[in-house]
Amino acid sequence: MVEYKLVISDKATSIARTVTDPNAAGFLGKRIGETVGGEVIGASGYTFRITGGTDKSGFPLRPNVPGARQVRLYVGEGFGFHAPRDGMRKRRRFRGDTVSEDTVQINLVVDQKGPKALAELFAAA
């Protein structure tokens, strides 16, 4: 059984929502940057873009690593590592850019708004 915690951002507000099978199957195989229809989570008329996520061990999904594999990268300043000194680099573990069964959290941004506000749609749920 696949279960994802979705964090949906719309400008200044964020909404957390948990999705289980069969709706969660709509996210399997999607990559960072792809769009997902709002019908998958009960927000018809909306379109969401995947911006990131986290795997079951807490490692972030990285957009420049293909697949769903786990890798160790030597990174400098930027995504996943903020150096305390200039020029410092360190090896960090990341997960690939594809949503899989090992993914726990998926970050979404609203691409296209629907007829109702997100707060109204998910208030009763």
Image (spheres, rainbow, N blue to C red):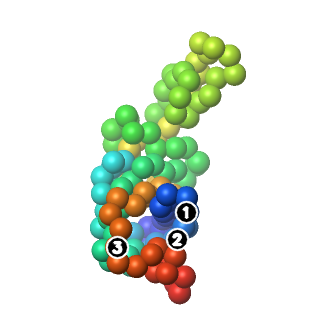
Which mark's residue is nearer the viewer, 3 or 1? 3
Which residue is under mark 1? 14
Q: Which residue is found at the position 40% from the left and 61% from the top?
A: 110
Residue 37, which numbered label? Answer: none
Which residue is under mark 3? 114
Of the numbered discs 2 and 3, the one sitting upstream in the chain is: 2
Residue nearer the viewer, 25 or 52: 52
Which residue is under mark 2? 17
Q: Which residue is found at the position 35% from the left and 59% from the top?
A: 111
The type of residue carrying mark 2 is Arg
Dividing the picture into quadrants, the one containing residue 87 is top right
Residue nearer the viewer, 123 or 81: 123
Q: Residue furthest right?
A: 84
Residue 38 left/right relative to 13: left
The type of residue carrying mark 3 is Gly
Q: Is residue 84 above or below residue 99?
A: above
Q: Which residue is found at the position 53% from the left and 28% from the top?
A: 78
The type of residue carrying mark 1 is Ser
Q: Where is residue 36 shown, x and y percent of the image?
A: 31, 62
Residue 14 left/right relative to 85: left
- Spatial CA distance of label 1 from label 2 is 10 Å
Q: Where is residue 2 shown, x and y percent of the image?
A: 44, 67
Which mark's residue is nearer the viewer, 2 or 3? 3
Dot 3 crowding, Cα within 10 Å, few <14, some 14–19, many 20+? some
- Spatial CA distance of label 2 from label 3 is 17 Å
Q: Is residue 104 visible?
A: no
